Image (cartoon, grey):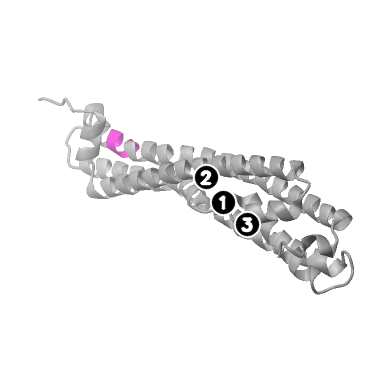
Amino acid sequence: MDVSHDLSLMALIGEASFLVQLVMAILLGMSVMSWWYIFQKIFALRETVEQTNSFEAEFLASSNLPALYEKTARSQDPSASLSRIFVSGFREFTKRSKKTEKPVSAARLDGTRRAMRATYQREMDRLETNLSFLATVGSVSPYIGLFGTVWGIMNSFRGLANVGQATLASVAPGIAEALVATAMGLFAAIPAVISFNHFVRNLERLSTRFDSFMEELSNTLQAEAEPEQFEEAA
């Protein structure tokens, strides 16, 4: 009796039961989507970091905040998160400068901080887009793969019940087919978990830089600004 079996990966997938194949298809789709989001996030964060470095250098070198505001407000770069925080804060500050006679009142500074904080939150929400999907893939993929494996092994043992003499050669293909689902679950989960942790660390560093910039801009406006300096920038 010929008990040889084709144990290549494609053969194992092709000979698996429908439910196991469905599990593999779901895991493959999750893996493809997670890699798509991973590359999107890599490029988006890289551009944001470059824009942040560039604007920080420009801000520190500038001695004319109204001119910097006018230049920055015309920029439409979607990755210029720090620039938009600056524009929103400076716009709010100059708007309030026309409504008070004090050089720098507490209300003006509080309004400026609130405007920057609102823009900061929108930018962080934008940068965190799709991270929840990576976290979901990283957490549930092994269990989806395990479900496929358990189902496949159950089918293998059901088949053995109809065999007069069970041998390793007869049970090995069914178990191998089932274990492919676990391997695919791990293949989907591991890159998603690693990428999620990497992106979270990068976002924490960006968040710290944004917070530091908002404090620095508030201090600069409080120490140096006079209402007359900003009338043309509103």
Q: CA distance from mark 2 to mark 3?
A: 21 Å
Dot 2, how many residues are within 10 Å of its Cα: few (below 14), some (14-19), or many (20+)?
some
Of helix, strand and loop, which one carries label 1? helix
- Region rendered in magenta: 175-179
Q: Amino acid at mark 2?
A: Ala
222 sits to left or right of 71:
right
Cβ atoms under marks 2 and 1 closer than 8 Å? yes
From the image, tell me which residue sits under label 1.
127
Q: Earlier in the sequence, mark 2 or mark 3?
A: 2
2 or 1: tag closer to the N-terminus: 2
Residue labelled with disc 3: 73
What residue is drawn where x is 61% and y is 51%?
81
| Residue that protrudes farthest toward the bottom in the picture | 99
Q: Main secondary structure of the magenta part?
A: helix
**Of 176 and 209, which appears nearest the observer?**
209
Q: Is residue 6 visible?
A: yes
Q: Is residue 2 magenta?
A: no
| Position of the N terminus by quadrant | top left
Q: What residue is disc 2 on? A: 44
Query: With respect to residue 197, does 88 lie above or below?
Result: below
- Crowd band around label 3 with a 10 angstrom C-alpha radius: few (<14), some (14–19), many (20+): some
The answer to which quarter of the image holds residue 155 is top left
Q: Are marks 2 and 3 in contact (CB under 8 Å)?
A: no
- Can residue 128 be spotted in the picture? no
